[in-house]
Image (tube, helix red, strand yellow):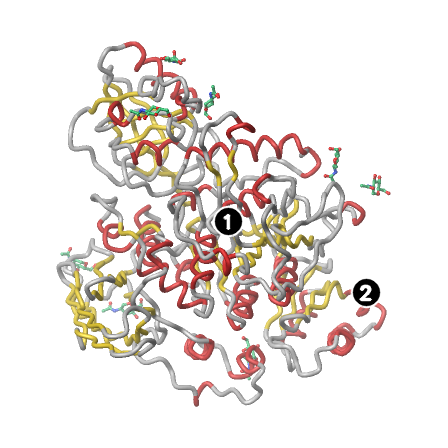
């Protein structure tokens, strides 16, 4: 498939990533019993564990026959936040079970891969950002990941009071795990597959991924001047006052669906406010997907799931099937790699990676490295070669392309007026993120060549070309895949942690991830629904500047802007009821939906369907045409809620590409009250003018004098390739 299809994902889901990836270990079992998840929806009235276990056992003995085998086959009963269980089954037993009353779905527990974390490093939030510390410290971020390393300075609890009263979770003891505190308030391992010996089960992060994720989301500010020899650097997460609860679901070989659901079952009941999941997995069916199921029950309780850092799956449909109650952040591709060539003034061509959307306007630009741009004042102590914060002189950097060692210099040099950055990093090749300026990562080997060239000439020059794509041969390497737990030690973890901290310091804007942002917004707006928070993050995202790769990026994609998200002006809210009518519309039947909702008499026929072509009050508009369709004709109904000024008037501003006409009725919305709702409709009319075009993208922006509430609009046509 062409690269450009992947790019659409950015547009379509805006700040939304794809919840997709590669699944492992899905071989069809011949004779051996395999773990299956039996999902049973909402908890019944009698939710005592004895009663639930009894029901689960009865179901198992019904289909297995043999009491003893039935008893031994059960691995685990869920039951704190939703109903269901895990059992070792033969395929025909699974089939039999799925037809039983009370069961929504039966599906094999598969392994998911961790997603690399690099992709969400692009979100900025200034250090002195206004914070609601009081309420932020009541926010609990639950992370489903590789566990946590409690000794990281990011989890120092100095100044934190006891955990919020609502906290109902645990800190489980384990090998080498030194325990929790008032910052890291919970840590639990979930290993239903017994992938490590039971006496070695521990919530400890032996990989580094979970620790990085947690500190990015909610690490405290850490001043590392003395620790790491970097002056005035501050590493901190998106919501540094928030508490962290770690749920370890990933072990050496991957992250099991059954563990993910067990963690959700716990986290919802434990009282977390935001759940972060950075795991891959292709969603074909919401009711056979552990993250979709877990996040649905979380959403019902007002808990937003953020899927951090995704990889665009190899197929477009993986994206369209992302559960709409999840907030996802766009990222990179699996079978495609974006390569970004760099040319030096001496004619040498080097190939780096990045997603650079800018075409150079000149043949060559002035080029400099950190060493030559350094501030030579004796009190500057940071790593200038890596372009650390406050080590360079703006006067030397301005208008130039800057070469920085390592992976973090771009944020600093961008802020100083550089027009592009070349960085050297061998570790992050598989992940991409979008930068505001031209950017390329070269290997450290090529980095050395660039450095040498710069040193060798009086006026070094260079240029960064727009990215092109190549097919990758190596499919995708998760950050942990090359290291089993057995060869991991504190030593490796420390190195990882160390590097990450330095990295954070260089990115003085901090690297809060999307869920840090969600937690941040939640701390100011505790009553907002998950959909409202998602809407706020989406409609206030910063549009990309410049001429991106394919016009589809220009109108649709953007970087999350958490501070703006506090004041979105209008929100597109969606309640549980609306998600359920969405499920009706997606074709799930009454019996399944009755079980999910716990409402025995649920009847999709009686449910007021969301009107219009998608039926969901989504903060973006997306329409898909068949391959041979050319005519576009659709109506979308939306309702916005006023969360800005009490009395205000919004006007609709529409951008539409050639061939597509976008009409908004009414195009003026007058509000007199807070939380007042106004409905409008968006009509799309037009046609694809040629056979080559496969998407048309535009946007709708509601503006009063203060707020701009922006929604991307995309019409996509299926293509052959
Ligand atoms: C615990 O720490 C010791 C010493 O660093 C190490 O040898 C051992 O492998 C660790 N065990 C686990 C399960 O991490
Ligand atoms: C766990 O048990 C195994 C086998 O009994 C033993 O070899 C191993 O050292 C134990 N691990 C720990 C951390 O106690
Ligand atoms: C160089 O660093 C010193 C010490 O931090 C600082 O006072 C000075 O303003 C810096 N110079 C420039 C031009 O930024
Ligand atoms: C500066 O940072 C780069 C990239 O991380 C690293 O390779 C280099 O060793 C550092 N230099 C010093 C003096 O710490
Ligand atoms: C380039 O010069 C800087 C000092 O200006 C030095 O630190 C660096 O090692 C040199 N790089 C190479 C590759 O020689
Ligand atoms: C409802 O759908 C499920 C599959 O999602 C199917 O197994 C079940 O038989 C259906 N029930 C009815 C009453 O159609
Ligand atoms: C368009 O494609 C669909 C199936 O993809 C087919 O059923 C239909 O006949 C096609 N229409 C035309 C006009 O080719
Ligand atoms: C578009 O494709 C159709 C059928 O595939 C073909 O008949 C038609 O000539 C094509 N039009 C253009 C402008 O290429």
Q: Residue furthest right?
A: 68
Q: Nearer the viewer, residue 537 or 160?
A: 160
Specify whether 439 is left or right of 83. left
- The disc at residue 240 is 1
Residue 157's place in the image compared with 385, above or below, is below
**Residue 676 pos. (x, y %):** 31, 78
Q: CA distance from mark 2 to mark 1?
A: 45 Å
269 relative to 151, above or below: below
Question: Residue at the spot x=63%, y=48% of the render?
Answer: 147
Marking on residue 54: none
Which comes before the other along the chain, label 2 or label 1?
A: 2
| Residue 287 seen in the current view | yes
Q: Quarter of the image holding residue 260?
A: bottom right
Give above or below for 555 relative to 652: above
Horizontal and vertical percent for residue 323?
Answer: 46, 65
Packing grade of label 2 (10 A; few <14, some 14-19, many >=20) is few
User: Image point 24% across, 47% down: which residue?
Assistant: 550
Front residue of this view, candidates 543 and 464 = 543
Expressed as whole percent of the image width and height from the top left, the position of residue 9 reads: 35, 54
Q: In which quadrant of the rendered view does residue 66 lie?
A: bottom right
> Can see residue 714?
no
Q: Which residue is mark 2?
A: 72
């Amino acid at each position: 498939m062409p690269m450009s299809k992947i790019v659409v994902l950015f547009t379509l889901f805006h700040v939304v990533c794809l919840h997709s990836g590669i699944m492992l270990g899905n071989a069809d079992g011949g004779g051996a019993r395999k773990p299956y998840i039996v999902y049973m929806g909402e908890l019944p009235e009698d939710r005592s564990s004895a009663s639930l276990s009894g029901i689960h056992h009865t179901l198992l003995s019904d289909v297995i026959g043999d009491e003893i085998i039935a008893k031994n086959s059960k691995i685990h009963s869920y039951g704190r936040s939703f109903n269901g269980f895990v059992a070792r089954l033969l395929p025909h037993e699974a089939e039999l079970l799925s037809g039983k009353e009370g069961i929504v779905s039966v599906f094999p527990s598969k392994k998911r891969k961790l997603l690399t974390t690099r992709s969400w490093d692009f979100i900025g939030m200034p250090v002195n950002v206004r914070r609601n510390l009081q309420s932020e410290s009541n926010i609990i971020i639950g992370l489903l990941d590789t566990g946590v390393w409690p000794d990281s300075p990011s989890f120092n609890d100095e100044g934190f009071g006891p955990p919020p009263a609502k906290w109902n979770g645990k800190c489980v003891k384990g090998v080498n795990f030194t325990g929790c505190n008032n910052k890291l308030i919970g840590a639990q391992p979930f290993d239903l597959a017994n992938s490590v010996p039971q006496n070695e089960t521990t919530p400890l992060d032996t990989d580094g991924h979970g620790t990085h994720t947690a500190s990015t989301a909610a690490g405290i500010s850490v001043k590392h001047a003395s620790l790491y020899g970097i002056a005035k650097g501050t590493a901190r997460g998106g919501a540094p006052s928030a508490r962290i609860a770690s749920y370890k679901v990933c072990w050496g070989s991957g992250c099991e669906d059954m563990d993910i659901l067990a963690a959700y079952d716990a986290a919802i009941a434990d009282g977390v406010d935001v759940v972060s999941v950075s795991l891959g997995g292709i969603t074909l069916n919401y009711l056979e997907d552990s993250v979709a199921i877990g996040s649905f029950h979380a959403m019902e309780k007002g808990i937003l799931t953020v899927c951090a850092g995704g990889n665009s799956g190899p197929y477009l449909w993986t994206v369209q099937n992302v559960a709409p109650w999840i907030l996802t952040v766009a990222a990179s591709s699996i079978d495609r790699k974006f390569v970004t060539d760099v040319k030096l003034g001496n004619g040498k061509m080097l190939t780096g990676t990045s997603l650079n959307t800018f075409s150079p306007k000149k043949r060559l630009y002035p080029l400099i490295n950190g060493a030559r741009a350094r501030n030579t004042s004796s009190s500057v102590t940071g790593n200038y070669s890596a372009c650390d914060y406050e080590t360079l002189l703006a006067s030397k950097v301005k208008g130039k392309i800057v070469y920085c060692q390592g992976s973090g210099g771009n944020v600093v040099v961008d802020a100083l007026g550089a027009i592009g950055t070349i960085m050297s990093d061998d570790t992050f090749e598989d992940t991409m993120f979008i930068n505001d300026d031209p950017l390329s990562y070269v290997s450290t080997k090529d980095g050395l060549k660039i450095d040498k060239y710069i040193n060798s000439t009086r006026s070094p020059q260079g240029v960064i070309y727009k990215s092109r794509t190549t097919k990758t041969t190596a499919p995708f390497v998760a950050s942990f895949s090359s290291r089993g737990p057995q060869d991991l030690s504190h030593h490796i973890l420390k190195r990882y942690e160390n590097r990450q901290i330095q990295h954070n310091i260089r990115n003085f804007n901090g690297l809060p991830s999307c869920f840090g942002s969600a937690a941040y917004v939640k701390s100011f707006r505790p009553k907002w629904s998950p959909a409202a928070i998602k809407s706020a993050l989406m409609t206030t995202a910063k549009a990309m500047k410049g001429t991106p790769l394919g016009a589809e990026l220009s109108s649709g994609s953007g970087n999350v802007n958490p501070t703006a998200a506090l004041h979105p002006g209008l929100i597109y809210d969606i309640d549980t009821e609306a998600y359920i009518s969405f499920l009706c519309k997606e074709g799930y039947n009454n019996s399944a939906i009755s079980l999910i909702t716990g409402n025995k008499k649920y009847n999709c026929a009686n449910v007021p369907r969301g009107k219009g072509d998608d039926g969901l009050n989504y903060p973006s508009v997306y329409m898909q045409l068949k391959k041979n369709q050319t005519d576009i004709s659709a109506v979308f109904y939306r309702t916005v809620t006023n969360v800005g000024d009490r009395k205000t008037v919004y006007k609709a501003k529409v951008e539409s590409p050639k061939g597509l006409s976008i009409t908004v009725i009414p195009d003026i919305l007058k509000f007199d009250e807070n939380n007042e709702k106004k409905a409008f409709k968006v009509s799309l009319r037009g046609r694809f003018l040629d056979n080559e075009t496969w998407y048309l993208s535009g946007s709708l922006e509601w503006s009063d004098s203060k707020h701009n509430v922006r929604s991307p609009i995309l019409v996509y046509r299926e293509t052959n390739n």
